[in-house]
């Protein structure tokens, strides 16, 4: 029984991607022109699979997004904001 439990635990460990990582990217979103714009940008980013957290600042005209890099990437995030009417780019 102990061998079976150990085998199951080992299989579960090996089946999880070892290279998965949480990343954070800052997007410049210059098209936000009013206090309500960040709501739309945040909703668009939150709908992207893999996004764990999105903080959008009207004052800075930027979005800080934390995401699982196995499920999504910066290109998908910028596409999501553009599709919502707010083109963005990765800040360097």
Image (cartoon, rainbow, N blue to C red):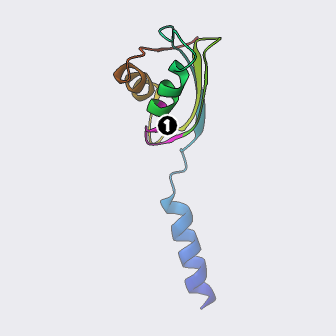
Q: Is residue 89 above or below residue 5?
A: above
Quick one: 39 or 23, which is closer to the camera?
A: 39
Boundaries of the magenta span: 45-51
Quarter in which the N terminus is drawn = bottom right
User: Does 47 lie within the magenta span?
Assistant: yes
Q: Is residue 86 above or below residue 76?
A: above
Residue closest to the far left: 83
Crowding at mark 1 (Cα within 10 Å: few <14, some 14-19, many 20+): some
The residue under the point 40% across, 29% down is: 76
Quick one: 32 or 8, which is closer to the camera?
A: 32
* Residue 71 quadrant: top left
Residue closest to the far bottom: 1
User: Does 87 lie within the magenta span?
Assistant: no
Task: Tell me residue 10's x, y (percent).
Answer: 57, 70
Q: Is residue 37 above or below residue 72?
A: above
Task: Tell me residue 92's x, y (percent).
Answer: 58, 11
The residue wearing badge 1 is 46
* Residue 57 quadrant: top right
Q: In the structure shown, which secondary structural element does the residue marked by tag 1 occupy? A: helix
Quick one: 37 or 69, which is closer to the camera?
A: 37
Task: Tell me residue 18's x, y (percent).
Answer: 55, 50
The residue under the point 54% across, 44% down is: 20
Task: Tell me residue 49's x, y (percent).
Answer: 43, 42
Q: How many marks?
A: 1
């Amino acid at each position: 029984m102990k061998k079976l439990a150990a085998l199951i635990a080992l299989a579960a460990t090996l089946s999880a991607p070892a290279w998965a990582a949480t990343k954070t990217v800052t997007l410049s979103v210059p098209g936000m022109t009013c206090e309500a714009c960040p709501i739309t940008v945040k909703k668009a980013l939150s709908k992207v699979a893999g996004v764990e957290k999105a903080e959008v600042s009207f004052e800075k005209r930027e979005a800080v997004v934390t995401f699982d890099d196995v499920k999504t990437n910066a290109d998908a995030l910028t596409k999501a904001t553009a599709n919502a009417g707010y083109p963005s780019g990765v800040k360097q």
